[in-house]
Amino acid sequence: MQFVPQVSLPIFDGGRNRANLDPAKARESLAVIEYERAIQTAFHEASDALDSQTLLDREVAARRAMHEVEARRRTMTMNRYLAGAVGYLEVLDAERGLFAADQALLDARRARLENAAALYRALGGCPSTSG
C-alpha cells in the first residue's frame, strides 16, 4: 500500500476567506494594543513602587532613630524619678512618647512591606487581587 496525501480546498469560495481575514486582523491589532497597554502599566507600577521603596526606607530609618531617642528619654526620666527629681507623671509622659514612636515605626514598616508586595506584583510575581 502506498500513502498518497490529498488536499481539498475550494477554489471559488465567493470571497468568504478574504472576508474572514479582516475581523481576524482587527482582533490581532486589538490584542497587540491591549498587550502594549499592559506592559506600559506594569512598567509604570514598578517604577512607582521602586521610587516609593526608597522613600519608605528613609522613613523607617528616621522612625527608628526617633524610637531610640524616645527610649533614651524614658530611661533618663525613669532614672530621674527613682532619684526623686521628677514626678511619675513625667515618666508616664515619656512612656506615652515611646509608645507613639513604636506605633509610628510599625506603621512605616507596614507601609514598606505593602510597597514591597506591590513591587513584587508589578514585576509579575503573583496576580493582583482586587479589593
Image (cartoon, rainbow, N blue to C red):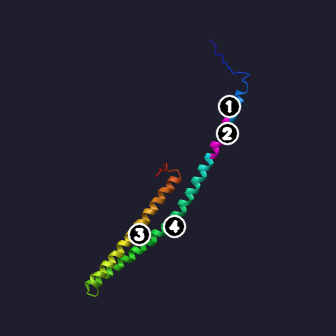
Report the mark closest to the observer, 2 or 3: 2
Q: In this view, does 110 lie above or below 40?
A: below
- CA gap between label 2 and label 3 equals 53 Å
**Residues under numbered marks 2 and 4 in contact, where contact means CB atoms less than 8 Å apart:** no
Residue 31 forms part of the magenta stretch: yes
- CA gap between label 2 and label 1 equals 10 Å
| Tag 2 residue | 26
Q: Residues within 10 Å of mark 3 (few under 14, many from 20)?
A: some
Which residue sits at x=40%, y=66%?
106
- CA gap between label 3 and label 4 equals 15 Å
Give SS at disc 4: helix
**Residues under numbered marks 2 and 3 in contact, where contact means CB atoms less than 8 Å apart:** no
* Dot 4 or dot 1, earlier in sequence: 1
| Tag 4 residue | 55
Give SS at disc 3: helix
| Tag 3 residue | 104
* Dot 3 or dot 4, earlier in sequence: 4
* Dot 2 or dot 3, earlier in sequence: 2
- Give percent across and percent down for residue 27: 64, 39
Report the mark closest to the observer, 3 or 4: 3
